[in-house]
Each structure stands twice: as C-alpha cells, then as structure tokens.
Image: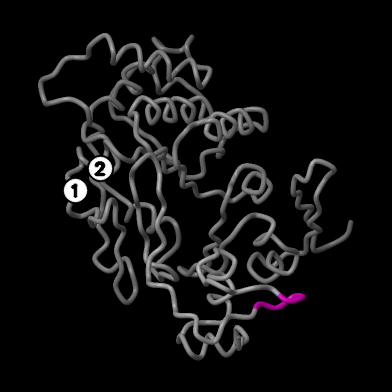
Amino acid sequence: MEFLSTRQVSAKWNITQRQVIELCLEGRVPGARKVDTHWIVPEDAEKPEDGRSLRYCGTTAKIKPFLKWAGGKGQLLPEIRKIYPEELGRSITKYAEPFVGGGAVLLDGRDLDQYSYRESARRIAVVAQHNYYNFEFSVQDVVMMGRAPHKRALDRDNADDFRLVAEALELVGMSGFARRSFSTLSGGEQQRVILARALAQQTPCLILDEPTNHLDIKYQLELMDIVKSLDRTVISAIHDLNIAAMYCDRLYAVKGGEIVGCGRPQEVLTEDFIRRVYEVEAKVFSDESGQLHILYHPAHRF
C-alpha cells in the first residue's frame, strides 16, 4: 500500500495540512497512521464528507468543519440560538452573515432556523455569561423559567415542576436561597442559579458561556464537577486552559473567527500551540495522576 504525506494530501483534498492532521487525530481517515512525529495517509483514502456529528442521548448535532464566521465566540454562540426560554423577554439578534462562505448549525439533521424556540429549548439549554432581569424575581422563579419549554401558554406550575426546581437548586448548592431575590445575589451565586435553571430545563445538551466567570476557585471546581457528572453533552466557551484541560474531553481552539486546533487536551495544549495561538510562553506537564497542567511564564522577570 502506498502512502502520502499530509502535505500531499492537503494539496489533493484542497484543505490545509493542519486540517489533514486534525482529521487523522479524530480517526476520520481510515488507514492513517503516525510514524515518528508525522502522519501518513493511504494513497487511495478519500476526503471525509463535510460535517462533524455530536451524538448525545439519541440526538445528533452537526457543524460544518473548518467553518469560518465573522467574529469570535460572541457571535458563534448566539448563532447556536433559539435556546433561551421565551419568557425571558429578550430579543436574540440574528446575524445576517454569521458564517463566511455559508454554513449552518444542524440539530437532528434540521437547520436550527427551522425549529421554534420551544422545540429547540426542549433539546438545548444555555448558561449565559450575563443575566439581567428587569423585575424582582425570586431564585425559585428564575429556575422555574427553565420549565417553560415544557408548558403551554396558560399551564400552571405543577408538583413535578417544583420537584425538578428543588432538585436543581440542591444540586448547585443553592437550596437555601429559593426565596431570595435574584438581584441580591453575588455574581457567582447568580451563575449557579442560572445553571440550576438550565438543569431544570431537562435537555440532553447544555451550552455554557464562560461558566466559571466571577467564581472563586472553590466554586469553579464545584460547578465544573457538577457539569462533568451530568449525563449530557456539554459545549462550553472556556478561557482558563487549566480548567479546560481538567474537564473537557475535546477542545476546539478559536482565533480570528477560525478553528485553529481541535482534539483531546493532551493533543491540543502543547507549549508550541500555546505560544502560537495565545502568544505567551508556558510549561506544559502532567502530574503523577496524568492530569495536564499549564504553568505560564511572565513576559518580564521581576
């Protein structure tokens, strides 16, 4: 059997050499193998069809690979939209040209634009970075909003709703705050309540936008432990590379509106990659348990 280098394959498939390597790392090129530090691909291997599928709890989501979009995660996450309970009273902006050269987010083979807000909110819940309310809602009221996709307009809250809300609050350690006004909570406490709202929504997938923002390290680890223990697919925007290495199964690094790296944390978070993408020097090492750690070096020594 004849083999080609990743450079030869990139010219044959009309994609970048890095994209060829990513396909090999993901196991999407049958017969590809690594020799020393280089990948080789069977000469007769065909380019995998466009689209990566994420399968979870009987649901499939698909995103066009190597997608470019006009902006960073601040525009990508809203594009994965129709995921907010309708009664929040906010308008989710649609971007006219979110993806450069076309593209779509598919859920169970359908474009998200084809779903009603209620339909998609039964499949995907979101924990946004900023949460504001114009009225004085109690913590219990906010979490109860997660039950809205499962109700008709005039349905009243029932015993199952109250049970799910209580369980969600207990899971995030906020049971004692049920009667408190949401606006009186600290930023970290509000973030845990919003996670409880998403859990009460009972969806097979969660999208988290910087979930550990505003949290002390204790609560960062507690929140991520909760999320990791869930039997759900989780898509999260995370800036802390150590948190990402500790809890994520796969990473997608985004820079300038483009995916510049993907794979397992050990494959992506190398010293060279951090230097190229984040423009900082770092030491990457694993402890005795195999956990990856990243130690940053300051630009100037004091």
Prevailing secondary structure class for the magenta stretch in the rendered image: strand
Of residue 166 and residue 98, the one placed in the foreground of this image is 166
Helix, strand or loop status at disc 1 = loop
Asked if residue 37 lies in the magenta stretch, the reply is yes
Q: Which residue is mark 1?
A: 115
Helix, strand or loop status at disc 2 = helix
Of residue 171 and residue 143, the one placed in the foreground of this image is 171
* Residue at the image point whose x is 55% and y is 48% from the top: 238
Q: Position of residue 62 (x, y in %)?
A: 35, 58
Q: Does the residue at mark 1 contact the one at mark 2 (Cβ under 8 Å)?
A: yes
* Residue at the image point whose x is 78% and y is 57% from the top: 284
Q: In the image, is residue 86 above or below residue 297?
A: above
Asked if residue 120 lies in the magenta stretch, the reply is no
State the count of labels.
2
The magenta segment is 35-39
Q: Quadrant of residue 228?
A: top right
* Residue at the image point whose x is 29% and y is 52% from the top: 107
Q: Position of residue 217 (x, y in %)?
A: 67, 33
Q: In the image, is residue 15 above or below residue 266?
A: below
Residue 293 is left or right of residue 259, and the answer is right
Q: Which residue is mark 2?
A: 120
| Distance (Cα) linking label 1 and label 2 | 6 Å
Residue 158 is left or right of residue 18, and the answer is left
Q: In the image, is residue 149 above or below residue 18?
A: above
